[in-house]
Amino acid sequence: MQIQNGTVSFNKLKGSGPRQTRSEVVFPNPVTQASAIVRGFDVAFSPRNDHHLGQLEVRLDTTIDALAPRRVNVDVVYGLRDWSNNWDDNYEGEIHFTVIAE
């Protein structure tokens, strides 16, 4: 079993969500299976004021690079909004994850 940690940052944004980014994790040895788990997060409306949480979405998906089997791509989805059902408030954050591979 091999374990690597990673973090992705999402800059301040409003008007759309949830959004997605990709992070690459490189292991010392080739892998045949990989899964990512949320290790933690720091998410907030920006500026950090008195908004009420309506929806927080955090998802992770992994794919092993077929041409470089030591490389695992982690797709991270993040969205934060209040009860208005619109993405009309600035939000930002960091998602911390761990990839476990064999």
Image: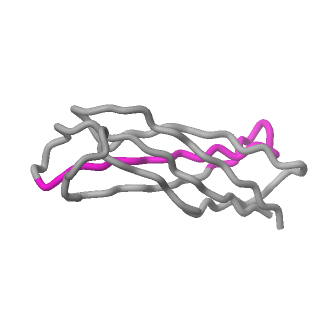
Magenta region includes residue 6? no
Figure check: 46 above or below 83: above
Q: How many marks do you count on the picture?
A: 0
User: Looking at the figure, which quarter contains the N terminus?
Assistant: bottom right
Give the residue at the far left of this rendering: 84
Give the residues in magenta.
63-83
- Image coords of residue 27 (percent x, y): 82, 49
Q: Is residue 45 left or right of residue 96?
A: left
Q: How is the image coloured?
A: one colour
Compared with residue 37, is residue 29 higher up or lower down, i.e. above or below? Answer: above
Judged left or right of residue 39, residue 89 is: left
Give the residue displayed 70% in from the left and 46% down from the top: 72
Image quadrant occupied by the C terminus: bottom right
Residue 31 placed where, x, y %? Answer: 81, 55
Furthest residue toward bottom: 1
Residue in the foreground of this view, choosing between 82 and 19: 82
Residue in front for this viewpoint, 64 or 50: 50
At 82% across and 45% down in the image, what residue appears? 70
Residue at 38% in and 40% down:
92
Q: Residue at x 49, y 37 (%)?
A: 21
Q: Residue 86: x, y in percent?
A: 14, 43
| Residue 93 horizontal/vertical position (percent) | 44, 44
Task: Note whether 93 is above or below 54 in the view shown.
Answer: above
Give the image quarter of residue 89: top left
Return the residue found at the far right. 29
Find out whether residue 72 is within the magenta segment: yes
Splitting the image into 4 quarters, where does residue 32 fall? bottom right
